[in-house]
Every structure is written in structure tokens, then in C-alpha cells.
């Protein structure tokens, strides 16, 4: 995530260094991409590093890749569904009994 943050801030050198720690340990070649290609490779590296640990779904949501069908390993939603809260867990109406100030997710209404 540090590499991702550096890449988003435009500090590609620091991003490559951060992701390079993981890639070096795995005996993989350093990343040479720049711009959006570098960001994509950092995302894919994180996906490989945490495969089977349940991070991919949340990374797709956090990065809004969930609305892109090319990331088909996670649930795909349209932009409208995403904005309406389709990516969240549904909240049962009975939860309002204990917390009447809570707002239910629009998508699951």
C-alpha cells in the first residue's frame, strides 16, 4: 500500500523502491513501468502477494476497480450501483431498533 500511495502522489521512484522490496524477496525483476501502468502493476503485485487472504475484493472496492468488468474476479457493479452502496453489506431494518440514527444502504432497500 505504501508503493500505491507513493505512485498516487507522483513519487514513482519511492513507489518502485517500496514494491521492489517485495519483488526482490520473490526473486522477481524490478518494475520499470511509469504512470498508470506502474499503478496497475503495483495493484497486481498486491493481488499476487495476498492471494487467498481476502484482500482482492476490498482492494477492488477501495480503488473503484469494482466497476470495471476486466477485474472479473471480484463482484462487478455499475457506477450507479456502486454509488448506491452495492459494494457494502446489507443492513437489516431491525438494526434501526438499537440505532435509529443509522442510515440503511440505498442499494439494499
Image (cartoon, rainbow, N blue to C red):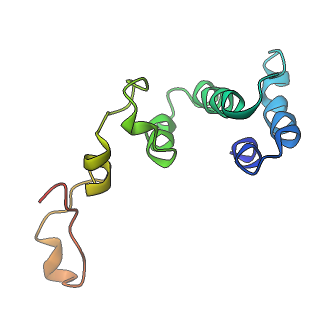
Q: Residue at x 82, y 39 (%)?
A: 12
x, y percentage for residue 73? 39, 24
Quick check: 77 left or right of 47? left
Q: Residue at x 57, y 29 (%)?
A: 47
Count numbered badges in the picture. Answer: 0
x, y percentage for residue 79? 32, 45
Q: Quadrant of residue 67?
A: top left
Which of these two is toward me, 78 or 30?
78
The quadrant of the rendering that contains the C terminus is: bottom left
Q: Residue at x 66, y 33 (%)?
A: 36
Q: Quadrant of residue 78?
A: top left
Quick check: 75 left or right of 108? right
Q: Quadrant of residue 23?
A: top right
* 16 to 97, vertically: above or below: above
Quick check: 66 left or right of 103? right
* 13 to 84, vertically: above or below: above
x, y percentage for residue 70? 42, 23
The quadrant of the rendering that contains the N terminus is: top right
Which of these two is toward me, 18 or 5?
5
Which of these two is toward me, 72 or 51?
72
* 36 to 30, vertically: above or below: below
x, y percentage for residue 16? 83, 33
Amino acid at each position: 500500500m505504501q508503493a500505491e500511495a507513493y505512485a498516487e502522489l507522483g513519487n514513482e521512484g519511492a513507489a518502485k523502491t517500496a514494491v521492489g522490496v517485495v519483488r526482490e524477496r520473490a526473486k522477481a525483476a524490478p518494475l520499470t513501468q511509469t504512470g498508470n501502468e506502474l499503478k496497475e502493476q503495483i495493484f497486481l503485485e498486491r493481488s499476487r502477494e495476498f492471494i487467498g487472504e481476502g484482500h482482492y475484493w476490498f482492494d477492488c472496492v477501495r480503488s473503484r476497480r469494482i466497476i470495471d468488468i476486466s477485474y472479473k474476479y471480484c463482484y462487478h457493479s455499475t457506477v450507479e450501483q456502486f454509488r448506491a452502496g452495492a459494494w457494502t453489506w446489507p443492513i437489516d431494518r431491525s438494526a434501526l431498533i438499537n440505532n435509529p440514527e443509522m442510515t440503511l444502504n440505498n442499494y439494499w432497500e
